[in-house]
Image: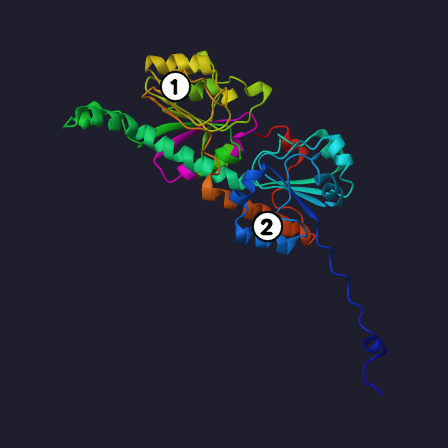
């Protein structure tokens, strides 16, 4: 007879392995290979059950409805169709959405909150390249790099650069950050090593929080009037629409630079165009209103404007950072752990 106690002699009952989540990809179809290269596709299929070639860019399309009905999780990216009540009615098992990009406002509806669907976003991962772009443009703007480039190209000879650009440089410059958002705080952190004074306007930032960030909290008018560069990082909300209007543009010092990597609706485009055409201000505009300016807009050709087509966020290989963030979230979900980057309704209302 065994010397083991009775409890140890009983057959061992193994706990059932957790069921792998069933995932459906939902995004603009041609973006899938840019987001998920073979290595990341392998990781995804190792974490979940899915058809990695099936992409829902229309939840009513042939072959999608049956897969949607089986899905526990949507793995989404840019171009995900809206999650309307009708769509969710056809997804009875859906319990989570893992978004491999920033804002979820283009497809999340009230029905998602009412169903209690868990949401995650790669907004933190996307904030870093936006902040890096803003940092680069702030430094170049204060250095007058583009102006001197154009001047050098024109004269093709020696100029007394120190006399002509005596107001250039980053030492002791004032930079105004509008919005202590996820990206705004990243910019503040990236600016920390430089000898600059950082002013911030954000109605939700109190004095103690500003002190912890090492910035000076000010109202919007004071920020515009005092800063050499004003960098926008606020969400597009009814109360922020055209917050940079004609009056506030006129408060900005001659030669100051406006940087907008947030949302075009924050700025009155007509008023800004007038100021820039006069040559009094400079601008770095990665976003505009409208999103694509008309072909005859002066902003395409002005020497004091850097105009880019909404590229400050993740571009090229930077998409893989967001994919990795989303895959990390899916792994947490598969192992029963909470999301590291949840989207909650209270933040959703004030997010970009």
Compared across the picture, whether 44 is left or right of 234 comes to right
Residue 17 position in % (x across, y down): 74, 60
Please say whether residue 196 is one of the residues in the magenta stretch.
Answer: yes
- The residue at 63%/32% (across/down) is 347
In terms of secondary structure, where does tag 1 sit?
Answer: helix
Q: Earlier in the sequence, mark 2 or mark 1?
A: 1
Name the image quarter holding residue 286: top left
In the image, the segment drawn in magenta is 190-209
Compared across the picture, whether 163 is left or right of 182 comes to left
Q: Is residue 271 visible?
A: yes
Query: Is 70 in front, or is 142?
Result: 70
Please identify the residue farthest to the left as the structure is shown. Answer: 158
Please say whether residue 64 is one of the residues in the magenta stretch.
Answer: no
Work out whether 277 lies above or below 124: above
Work out whether 122 lies above or below 247: below
- The residue at 46%/35% (across/down) is 130
Compared across the picture, whether 13 is left or right of 20 comes to right
Q: Circle 2 is placed at which residue position?
A: 328
Query: Is 87 in front, or is 306?
Result: 87
In terms of secondary structure, where does tag 2 sit?
Answer: helix
Residue 125 position in % (x across, y down): 52, 42
Query: Is 94 in front, or is 114?
Result: 94
Task: State the CA–CA distance, disc 2 to disc 1.
Answer: 41 Å
Work out whether 79 lies above or below 307: below
Please identify the residue farthest to the bottom as the structure is shown. Answer: 1
Residue 74 position in % (x across, y down): 67, 42
Please identify the residue farthest to the front as the structure is shown. Answer: 62
Q: Circle 1 is placed at which residue position?
A: 299
Disc number placed over residue 271 in the picture, else none: none
**Which image quarter holds the C terminus?**
top right
Name the image quarter holding residue 251: top left
């Amino acid at each position: 007879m065994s010397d083991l106690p009775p409890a140890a002699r009983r057959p061992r009952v193994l706990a059932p392995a957790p069921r792998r989540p069933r995932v459906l990809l939902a995004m603009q179809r041609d973006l899938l290979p840019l987001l998920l290269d073979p290595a990341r596709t392998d990781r995804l299929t190792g974490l979940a059950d899915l058809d990695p070639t099936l992409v829902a860019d229309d939840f009513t399309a042939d072959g999608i409805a049956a897969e949607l009905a089986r899905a526990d999780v949507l793995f989404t990216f840019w171009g995900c169709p809206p999650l309307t009540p009708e769509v969710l009615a056809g997804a009875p098992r859906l319990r989570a959405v893992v978004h491999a990009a920033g804002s979820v406002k283009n497809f999340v509806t009230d029905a998602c909150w009412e169903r209690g669907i868990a949401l995650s976003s790669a907004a933190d991962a996307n904030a870093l390249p936006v902040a890096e772009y803003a940092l680069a443009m702030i430094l170049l703007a204060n250095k007058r790099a583009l102006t001197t480039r154009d001047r050098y190209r024109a004269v093709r000879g020696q100029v007394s650069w120190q006399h002509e650009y005596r107001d250039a440089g980053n030492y002791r410059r004032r930079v105004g950050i509008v919005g202590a958002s996820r990206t705004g705080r990243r910019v503040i952190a990236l600016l920390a090593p430089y000898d600059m004074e950082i002013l911030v306007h954000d109605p939700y930032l109190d004095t103690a929080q500003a002190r912890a960030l090492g910035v000076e909290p000010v109202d919007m008018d004071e920020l515009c009037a005092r800063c050499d560069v004003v960098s926008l990082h606020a969400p597009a909300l009814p109360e922020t629409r055209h917050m940079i209007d004609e009056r506030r543009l006129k408060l900005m010092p001659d030669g100051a630079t406006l940087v907008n990597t947030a949302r075009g609706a924050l700025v009155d485009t007509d008023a800004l165009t007038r100021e820039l055409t006069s040559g009094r201000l400079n601008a770095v505009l990665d976003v505009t209103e409208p999103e694509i300016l008309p072909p005859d807009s002066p902003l395409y050709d002005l020497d004091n404007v850097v105009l880019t087509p909404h590229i400050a966020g993740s571009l090229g290989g930077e998409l893989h950072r967001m994919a990795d963030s989303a895959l990390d979230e899916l792994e947490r979900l598969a192992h029963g752990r909470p999301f590291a980057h949840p989207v909650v309704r209270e933040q959703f209302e004030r997010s970009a």
